[in-house]
Amino acid sequence: MPELPEVETTVRGLRPVLEGRRIASIEARRPDLRRALPVDLRQRMTGARVTGIRRRAKYGLIDTDRGDTMIFHLGMSGHWRIDPAELGAHDHLVIDTDEGRRVALNDARRFGSVDAVRTEAIEDWPAIKALGPEPLSPDFNVDTLCAKLAGRKAPIKAMLMDQRVVAGLGNIYVCEALNLARIAPARIAGRISRERLSRLVDAVRKVLTAAIDAGGSTLRDFKAPDGTLGDFPAQYRVYGREGDACPCGGTVKRRAESGRSTFYCPRCQR
Ligand SMILES: [Zn+2]
């Protein structure tokens, strides 16, 4: 599933094609993905100039000079294709620019979404309003994390996956960050020392930054908009590596819970 680094990679890939360009046409080739596409999407976006493309958690935001922002979520399998030679059955939304370039949102499983919101109201949009701080921003730090976790009896892994605690993290990068910070995933969140949480903040940043630098992960065939596959999985310390050696020399274990797998090293993660 695309996580924060994959969405960041996507946003960076779309920028050179869309930023500063006018949307000559936008075509929804089906009425819905996970939910209905906005009925006025074409009317709001056709002729608008793209003023910027950014990311908030796992959402991509395409801002226009009309004060409208198109918000996309990649769901499980979504990715944008740039200048596709031809359109396929899963290219559900197609944007052509005034420069004659084309991007297509391809989403075979259709768990993704597309919405249009007034740019000034983005932070009040329900799915974004509920989000915690961006993990790569200064708002995510040991003070804010301590405050969110104080008194919480849930395992630290569950708390990091909670988008209200920190935005955009999923299973892969949480497993990786906990290993790097040497914290056991089942550790009760509210009882972890400030010093160790400080290490965790650093670990989250390091893991995400390395993943973005590597162009994201290939899990579920994630592709960057230029069609290349990210090579971050080559750097996984524990994720998907049950039985392999942890960098500390211990053996990586896997625990299955509610349909997800937790990968960790019982030797160095306490
Ligand atoms: Zn280890």
Image: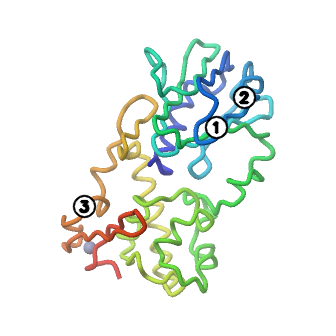
Task: Describe the element under mark 3 as helix, strand or loop.
Answer: loop
Residue that badge 2 annotates: 41
Residue under the point 35% across and 70% down: 179
Q: How many marks?
A: 3
* 107 lies left or right of 123: left
Tags 1 and 2 in contact by the CB under 8 Å rule?
Answer: yes
Q: Which residue is mark 1?
A: 114
Q: CA distance from mark 3 to mark 2?
A: 43 Å
* Quadrant position of residue 236: bottom left
Report crowding for label 2: few under 14, some 14 to 19, many 20 or more residues within 10 A (C-alpha): some
Residue 202, position in %: x, y?
A: 47, 67
The image position of residue 13, as x and y in percent, is 50, 33
Q: Amino acid at mark 1?
A: Val
- Quarter of the image that includes the C terminus: bottom left
- Contact between marks 3 and 1 (CB within 8 A): the answer is no
Judge depth for marks 3 and 2 and give the one in front.
2
Task: Name which of mark 1 and mark 2 comes first in the sequence.
Answer: 2
* Drawn side of residue 215 relative to residue 38, left or right: left
Residue at 45% across / 41% down in the picture? 77
Q: Which residue is mark 3?
A: 241
Instruction: Name the element at disc 1.
Output: strand
CA gap, disc 1 and disc 2: 9 Å
Q: Is residue 201 above or below residue 226?
A: below
> Disc 2 marks which amino acid?
Leu
**Mark 3–mark 2 CB contact (< 8 Å):** no
Residue 226 placement (x, y as % from top left): 43, 28
- Which residue is nearer to you in this view: 270 or 79? 79
Per the model, the C-alpha gap separating discs 3 and 1 is: 34 Å
Label 3 amino acid? Arg
